Amino acid sequence: MFKNSNEFSLHIEQLVQEKRLNYMDAVLDYCQENSLEPSDISKLINKSLKDKLEMNFRELNYLPKQAQLDV
């Protein structure tokens, strides 16, 4: 198990790169491999990972689109 949310986030980042998954699929893949429910790992999701998951959900139209500024 992970000592903190940053270690978990780094592990998910690694899964995203190695398996070419999106963030949502990487988290679900981790849960499936370790026989966990997604609610069991909710405390391990830090702000950075949460933002990436939210962006992923918006791209997949699970959340409404937000206006973005072109910077």
Image (cartoon, grey):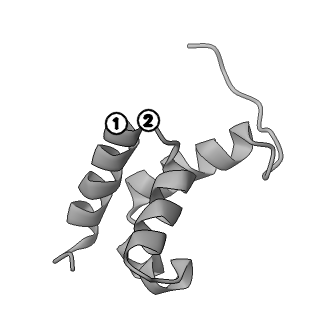
Left or right, residue 2 beside residue 27:
left
Label 1: which residue? 17
Q: Eyeballing the image, is 1 above or below 13?
A: below
> Where the C terminus falls, by quadrant?
top right
Q: CA distance from mark 2 to mark 1?
A: 5 Å
Please provide percent x and percent y for residue 16. Answer: 39, 42
Along the viewing direction, whichever of 20 and 45 lies nearer the viewer: 20
Residue 46 image offset from top left, x and y in percent:
38, 64
Q: Secondary structure at mark 1?
A: helix
The image position of residue 12, as x and y in percent, is 35, 54
Q: Is residue 69 above or below residue 29?
A: above
Looking at the image, residue 4 lies above or below residue 7: below
Q: Residue at x 40, y 52 (%)?
A: 48
Quarter occupied by residue 35:
bottom left
Q: Which residue bears the numbered disc 2?
A: 20
Total count of labels: 2
Residue 34 at x, y percent in the picture: 37, 77
Residue found farthest to the left: 3
Tell me the kind of residue under disc 1: Gln
Q: Nearer the viewer, residue 14 or 52?
A: 14
Give the amino acid at mark 2.
Arg
| Left or right side of 24 for 2 | left
Q: Quadrant of residue 66?
A: top right
Sort mark 1 into few (<14), some (14-19) or many (20+) by Cα contacts within 10 Å: few
Task: Check whether the beta carbons of the residues at disc 2 and disc 1 lie within 8 A of each other.
Answer: yes
